């Protein structure tokens, strides 16, 4: 594995665990579960702006993944889409780059 691929993998893992640790902590300390967490994303103009920023980035990443998977036939890369929407762009993007840069056989 190349250094670049290794870095993508490390970033995907970090991008999965770091945000999730905050989400899980928030949901365990505050009533409302996932609904309460989503409500917190819109509590101020700053968090609303960040939420929309990440949502638009996630949609753009999804379109890119779908377009490239169609051409490259790298079906495994589709796993980056649920990672993006269930965890975040911080996991989905480096995961996709890791899967995309695998050696072609």
Image (cartoon, helix red, strand yellow):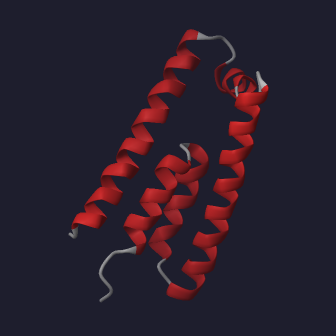
Q: Residue at x 49, y 34 (%)?
A: 19
Against 16, residue 75 (above or below) is below
Q: Position of residue 40 (x, y in %)?
A: 71, 22
Q: Position of residue 5 (x, y in %)?
A: 30, 65
Q: Residue at x 56, y 52 (%)?
A: 84
**Left/right of residue 65 with respect to residue 3 in the rendered view:** right
In this rendering, the count of numbered labels is: 0
Q: Quadrant of the C terminus?
A: bottom left
Residue furthest front as drawn: 46
Against 12, residue 33 (above or below) is above
Q: Residue at x 55, y 78 (%)?
A: 69
**Left/right of residue 5 with respect to residue 43 in the rendered view:** left
Q: Residue at x 59, y 83 (%)?
A: 70
Q: Position of residue 100 (x, y in %)?
A: 42, 73
Q: Position of residue 57 (x, y in %)?
A: 65, 55
**Left/right of residue 1 with respect to residue 9 in the rendered view:** left
């Amino acid at each position: 594995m190349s250094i670049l691929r290794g870095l993508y993998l490390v970033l995907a893992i970090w991008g999965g665990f770091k945000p999730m640790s905050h989400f899980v902590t928030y949901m365990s300390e505050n009533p409302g579960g996932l609904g309460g967490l989503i409500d917190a994303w819109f509590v101020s103009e700053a968090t609303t702006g960040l939420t929309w920023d990440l949502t638009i980035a996630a949609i753009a990443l999804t379109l890119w993944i779908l377009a490239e998977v169609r051409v490259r036939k790298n079906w495994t890369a589709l796993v980056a889409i649920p990672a993006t929407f269930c965890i975040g762009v911080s996991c989905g993007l480096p995961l996709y780059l890791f899967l995309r840069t695998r050696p072609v056989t």
